[in-house]
Image (cartoon, rainbow, N blue to C red):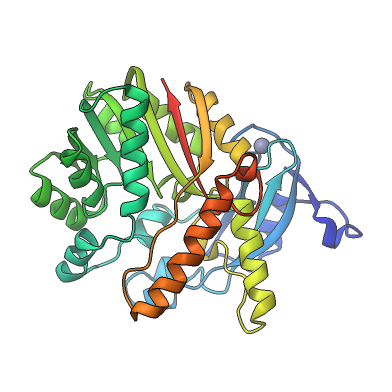
Amino acid sequence: MPVALDAANAAARPVSMAADAAAMPAPPASFAPVPACWVCGGVSARRFHRLAFDFDLYAEQDPGLHAYTQRCAWLVRCTDCGFAQPDVMPTLPHFFERMYDQHWSEAWIEREFAAPYKDFIFRRILGELRRRRQSAGGRLLDVGAHAGRFMHAAQHAGWTVEGIELNPRTAACAARHTGAPVHVLNAHELGGRGLRYDAITMTDVLEHIPEPVSVLTTVARLVEPGGWIAVKVPCGSSQWHKERALAALRPSRRVSLADNLVHVNHFTPGSLARALRTAGFHDVDVETAPPELVYEGSPASRIVSNAVRLAVYAAGRLPGAVHTPLALHLQAFARK
Ligand SMILES: [Zn+2]
């Protein structure tokens, strides 16, 4: 995939992703080039952020993963659709499963179930699904159910819920609190069982999974004709502006956008809509998503922090503002 450098490096020569990979230090930590945009298939992209790997914490748990420490990759933005992704991907088998193999304590998982920081986001999703379906209830699948707080809220809103959650401990927590099925499977395996849903939610999930159109196509097969999908992701371009602004205010703070490839997909409103349409959805709306709210710390700091978050959100909901840096997160709704 030929890439042109960004404006800051405009004088530099075009380079190829394959050449970059070859120029990196020797194996065992190796990479494979990503040949084209995961959303539109375009082959022209500009580098804009160098991301770092740090797996020091995995030195004993997983030496293969730890070998990637101090390696680097580039985030590149597709010049055709605006979507951004890494220029290379680690070739280590099951890289992401190994990275997310976190041994959370039962107490921490229970606190995640009890924590209300995403409730504002959840209320918006449930309210909007109800409005669009013009009824309450139906079968809802939450992909990436985590500890089950959203499933629990959806149950109280009248839905018959199920979840997908690959971490067996958080899946068990979600099942315990809802009494509902929580599948420790990926969406592809679930589709093979013939299950179908009236609504599927993916909240803060899609940014973590490579090749998002392929993921959405698999999920689309699980949605009944006429059913809905709700997808929430960070807005890649806005997060980049925010990180740069914070780093400018505090020079000791480095721009941390996707270290360790925690986020592999960096959507703009247009590229998220395009990904959903390519996956087979229509009636696509992409809006500014509500923020997480702070519920810990001193009352004064909570009030100030939440007031800032809500003010930015209110500004981001103004007409056209979803295309500005005020839209830090995106919430899409689309119909099968
Ligand atoms: Zn593209």
Residue 119 horizontal side relative to residue 159, left or right: right
**In the rendering, at what x and y percent does residue 83 appear?**
63, 43
Q: Please tell me whether residue 43 is drawn above or below residue 308 in the rendered image.
A: above
* Residue ID at (54%, 48%): 265
Residue 20 is at least partly visible in this image: yes
**In the rendering, at what x and y percent does residue 99 appear?**
39, 62
Q: How many marks?
A: 0
Q: Residue furthest bottom?
A: 252
Residue 244 occupies which quadrant of the picture? bottom right
User: Dividing the image into four equal quarters, which quarter contains ligand 1?
Assistant: top right
Q: Is residue 2 or residue 67 the one in the foreground?
A: 2
Residue 190 horizontal side relative to residue 327, left or right: left
Which quarter of the rendering shows the N terminus? Answer: top right
Q: Please tell me whether residue 66 is drawn above or below residue 328 in the rendered image.
A: below
Residue 59 is at least partly visible in this image: no
Q: Residue furthest top?
A: 225
Q: Please tell me whether residue 70 is drawn above or below residue 31 in the rendered image.
A: below
**In the rendering, at what x and y percent does residue 12 appear?**
88, 59
Q: Residue furthest right?
A: 11
* Residue ID at (57%, 49%): 316
* Residue ID at (11%, 45%): 178
Q: Is residue 293 or residue 194 the one in the foreground?
A: 293
Residue 139 occupies which quadrant of the picture? top left
Which quarter of the rendering shows the C terminus? Answer: top left
* Residue ID at (48%, 70%): 67
